[in-house]
Amino acid sequence: MIAKYRRITIEIVVGILLIASFYFLLSARKKSIWPRDRVVADTGHRQIMGTFARIVAVAMDQNTAEKCAEAAFNELHIVDNLMSHYKADSEISKVNRTAHKEAVKVSRPVFDLLQKAIEFSAQTDGAFDITVGPLVDIWRLAEQKNSTPTEAELAEAAAKVGYEKLILDAQSRTVRFAADGMHLDLGAIAKGYAVDLATEAMQKAGAIGGLVDVGGDIRVFGYPPRQKNVWVIGVQDPARASETIVPSLSILTLKLINAAVATSGSYYRFTLIDDKKQSHIIDTSTGTGIKAVSSVTIISTNTTDADALATAVSVMGPEKGLALIETIPDTEAILILPGPEFKQLQTSGAQKYIKKQLANP
Ligand code: AMP
Ligand code: MG
């Protein structure tokens, strides 16, 4: 009898101890006092991919943190060298020069990203379209001449645009154009893809946390620096937009754990003709710059998707864009409409990511 009571008492004490240690671990994790010895390497802003990139690596020793940050930057350079249509010797430039004549073999990463881009085109009814190149060129030329392109010029460029004219062959891993004069512009997805690969490189190199930011396409994972629980990311206020590399004027801040965020902002990059701003994001159905939104921020699990969807929703506009994002799991959108009101709209699950609303929506 006494032995039985003793056993029950021991079981109760062990149970209490287990529950207590569980709560201790939970609260320790919440306060992020564990691991307390983490160190940080912060590269600051460096110029790459036509914009600025910053990498923050968190590790248990300085040497590893610095190695992780450099591994991530290295990955950004690799993607840039493969995907940039500004670099004459990139694979995409080779495709642009040759694919109207013959099928061009490309590397696995380029092929996979092209395939993904076509999937986004199909999903967004062509709002997202990496064959937009000829229209981008026409507006760049128009800016140089400071004169709006004619209807005929726009129609001629539009005839060379259309993702259904981009032919991929998975077996031979080749790319072919169905029309002369086509060319690819991966500006709306390559940065996000580069951020994803840089994040993986940092994780492989031993980081326990990190942030990769390429021109506002951002991914965070693991432990944030300085005993924090979440990564805090600012979303630039289009009403107070500046072209500084560190946007200090945020409309809101986001709290993120293992997440990606990308913003497409027409306030930041545009062409200027006759003092009129024209968004760098083009609605391929009209051949002109989008007008319906000032910025679109997408929160997702990876930056490739966030980047492509931010551009797509910019073209689709608030109604169709928000409806699309509502159907995609683990994905939210925050839209800011054009001024002077700069009204803010968001998907039903976006609020949980908003840490602070800094300016009135
Ligand atoms: P982002 O800043 O990610 O929205 O990408 C914008 C860039 O993507 C532009 O500067 C163009 O190079 C390219 N682009 C423009 N319009 C489109 C479009 N409708 N679909 C895909 N890419 C586009
Ligand atoms: Mg994009």
Image (cartoon, rainbow, N blue to C red):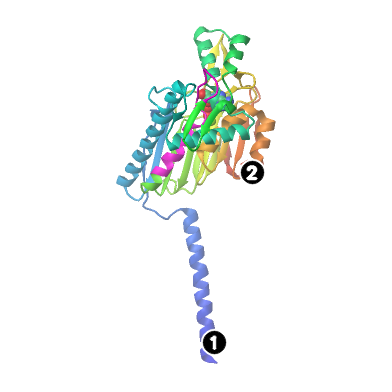
Q: Secondary structure at mark 1?
A: helix
Q: Which residues are magenta?
A: 177-201
Mark pair 1, 2: CA separation = 52 Å
Q: In this picture, is 169 found above or below 2?
A: above
Instruction: Find out whether residue 260 is within the magenta segment.
Output: no
Crowd around label 2: few <14 · some 14–19 · many ≥20 (10 Å): few
Residue type pointed to by label 2? Gly
User: Which residue is nearer to you in this view: 188 or 260?
Assistant: 188
Q: Earlier in the sequence, mark 1 or mark 2?
A: 1
The residue under the point 56% across, 7% down is 147
Residue 217 horizontal/vertical position (percent): 49, 34
Q: Is residue 268 visible?
A: no
357 or 262, nearer to the observer: 262
Instruction: Find numbered disc 2 in the image and state the secondary structure of the residue it sits on.
Output: loop
- Label 2: which residue? 349
Q: Nearer the viewer, mark 1 or mark 2?
A: 2
Report the residue marked by disc 1.
5
